[in-house]
Amino acid sequence: MPPVFRFAPSPNGHLHLGHAYSALLNHDLARQSGGRFLLRIEDIDGTRCRPEFEQAIYEDLTWLGIAWETPVRRQSEHFAAYRAALDRLSAQRLVYPSFESRAEIAQLVAAREASGAWPRDPDGAPLYPGTAKSLSAAERDRLSRQGAPFALRLDMAAACASAGDLRWHEVGEGPAGERGDVAARPEAWADVILARKETPTSYHLSVVIDDALQGVSDVVRGVDLFWSTSVHRLLQQLLGLPVPAYRHHHLIRDAAGQKLSKSTRATGLRELRAEGASPADIRRVVGLP
Ligand code: GLU
């Protein structure tokens, strides 16, 4: 079986040099290994994703010389598949609803921080304190009947107990030089959100389902997602899905050493193209032969 690579951008802004590096690296690796290259549009967030950004992704990648298989998988067309996975996790009693607003969660965290340090996830956000886990069934029913907004969270302690110790094979490198056989640490994220009332999925859930459904053998993506792989391994285990190899790559930074943002014009592919840069210039700037 030829290896399968994918580039999976979210159409919530224009692509920049960091995306170009990731897309070109995936495309090069697929070509060098006689593998396949897929493009996936990660557009589950209907409030931030826009058709014109999706169109711009196709244009920018074509300009870079990248060709992908069609049809392109657009996540917004597959909510039923994600909901089915969520139902499987619910049937394992690993999912619970939490009804607090973001402001209420911030207050709960502040109260805990007032009496000592409160743990943060690998991205630096305070962990959800797990308060809704102890709501009674009657209380959950009452809140749902009122139509209260909710998030569906993974019961991390129960999920880890069910899955046991997990590892993945890292071909690239983690933020502290982790490579080879890496131990997953999903508990570092606590009770992650898997879905919301208005969106029956999340980044973590849909990426795991899609990589499996599309037969992706090699996940090549930025090192900012390195520790998310812990959650992905856990979901793969709970849902009985195959485990790809992972290659996390360094991030392209701006002259000041900052991570690139979709709103910074200086490193946007469209801007660089308008200034006369060629696809070969882009390859050179991101350090690809
Ligand atoms: N959609 C994600 C992003 O744009 C990438 C997901 C992945 O590569 O796993 O950051």
Image (cartoon, rainbow, N blue to C red):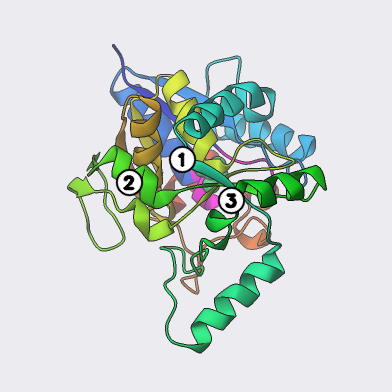
Residue 14, magenta (yes or no): yes
> What kind of element bears circle 3?
loop
Q: Local crowd at mark 1 within 10 Å, few (<14), some, or many (≥20)? A: many
Q: Which residues are magenta?
A: 9-20
208 vs 92, nearest the viewer:
92
Residue hosting label 1? 94
Q: Of label 3 and label 1, which has the lower sequence position? A: 3
* Location of the C terminus (image quadrant): top left
The CA distance from mark 3 to mark 1 is 38 Å
Q: Residue furthest top?
A: 1
Residue 138 image position (x, y, % from top left): 67, 47
In the visual, does 250 lie left or right of 74? left
Q: Amino acid at mark 1?
A: Leu
Query: Is 183 situated left or right of 25 in this image?
Result: left
For the residue marked with disc 3, what is the amino acid?
His
Q: Which residue is mark 2?
A: 160
